[in-house]
Image: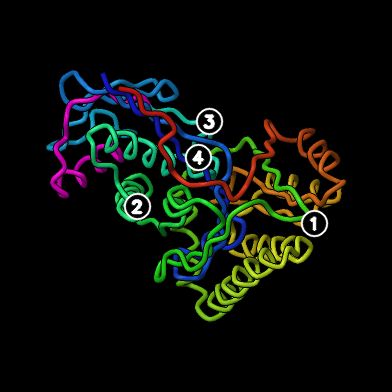
Amino acid sequence: MTEVTARAPSKVIVLGEHFVVLNSRALSTAVSIYSRATAEDGGEGVIIESKSMGVRARLDVGSRAPDPRLEPFAEALRRLRSMDYDLAPARVVVDSDAPPSAGLGSSASTVAAFLLAYTTLVGDPLNKDNLFSITLAAEDVAHGASSGVDPATVVYGGTILYSIKDRVIERLEGPIRGARLIIADSGVRRSTAGPVMSVIELRRRLGQPAELIYSAADIVALRGIEALKRGDAAELGLLMNFNHGLLSAIGVSSPELEDLVYAARAAGALGSKLSGAGRGGIVIALAPEGSEDKVTGALRARAPWVLKPEVGVPGAEVVELTR
């Protein structure tokens, strides 16, 4: 029996969420919170199991998945079939350390790990570009039209400057010099599609004022990657604070998120903001060296969980292959 285990990181959008949907640039980083998929050959058809979702089902490319939560995986198989893959029988067990609907890209991460494990098992592993394009198609099923920033980050890894038009514009590797990124959960769950559609409608209604906000967000993301390249954590934090103000202006913050954002700043964070679709999910804070424990403590007093992952980690990869 052949068995393959692959993993893909989660993602955090440092600058530019929502604005990226309408072609502004965004700065996103891969973090060491992983989804994993283990594929083994044999059986009848392609069976997928997930303990976190509590499902076990056979995926048939000719029909809808038996559980709506599995439809992105079924779409991934349809895309493989269109590329003339032989969909050999296999059992694939998937799981993720990232909580769903938190803004960490767990759906893209899990699908990318699933695809890489399965295609490696059948002897024809997807290259990064094909893995990205199929994961993007699966994300469109999961959330409606996707900007692609989540699939790009979890597949290619590192820290990326991204736009819908140009895809990955620039990519850096490694941590943020002089500071540590901290993630805190608001405890509020939300869908991605709802906030995204309301922001698009707001831009349509407001016109020029909203367009100016989008232009500002685009410049902020570009300045963010330049700050990273210089190792200027203080400027990156300032840009995060500014970006959070723009996100508040378009209506995607919440009292729970604001409480965490300002608690982090009061504890010494260089910058803090919501990350992801907003109206719930996570806040990120950039703690300078020497203030990490104080910022973490302030967030832990208010949040269900707080994590300090590594950032800029490699993208989707095979971690074990046994025959």
Measured in 3D between alpha carbons, the distance from the residue under mark 3 to the one under mark 1, in whole angstroms, is 27 Å
Classify mark 4: residues with Cα within 10 Å, few (<14), some (14-19) or many (20+). Answer: some
N-terminal label among 1 and 2? 2
N-terminal label among 3 and 1? 3
**Residue in view at x 27 percent, y 38 percent:** 119
* Dot in front, 4 or 1: 1
Q: Is residue 3 left or right of residue 180?
A: left
N-terminal label among 2 and 4? 4
Q: Secondary structure at mark 2?
A: helix
The amino acid marked with disc number 3 is Asp
198 in magenta: no
User: The C terminus lies in which quarter of the figure?
Assistant: top left
Residue labelled with disc 4: 101
Q: Position of residue 319 (x, y in %)?
A: 44, 33
Classify mark 1: residues with Cα within 10 Å, few (<14), some (14-19) or many (20+). Answer: many
**Residue in view at x 22 percent, y 40 percent:** 77
The amino acid marked with disc number 2 is Leu
The amino acid marked with disc number 1 is Leu
Up the image or down, 172 lies above or below 50; here it is below
Residue labelled with disc 3: 97
Q: Secondary structure at mark 3?
A: loop
**Magenta stretch, residue numbers:** 71-93
Q: Residue furthest bottom?
A: 208
Q: Is residue 185 left or right of residue 40?
A: right
**Residue in view at x 21 percent, y 30 percent:** 59
Tag on residue 136? 2
* Dot in front, 2 or 4: 2
User: The N terminus lies in which quarter of the figure?
Assistant: top left
**Residue in view at x 50 percent, y 51 percent:** 157
Up the image or down, 284 lies above or below 161; here it is above
Q: Secondary structure at mark 4?
A: loop
83 in magenta: yes
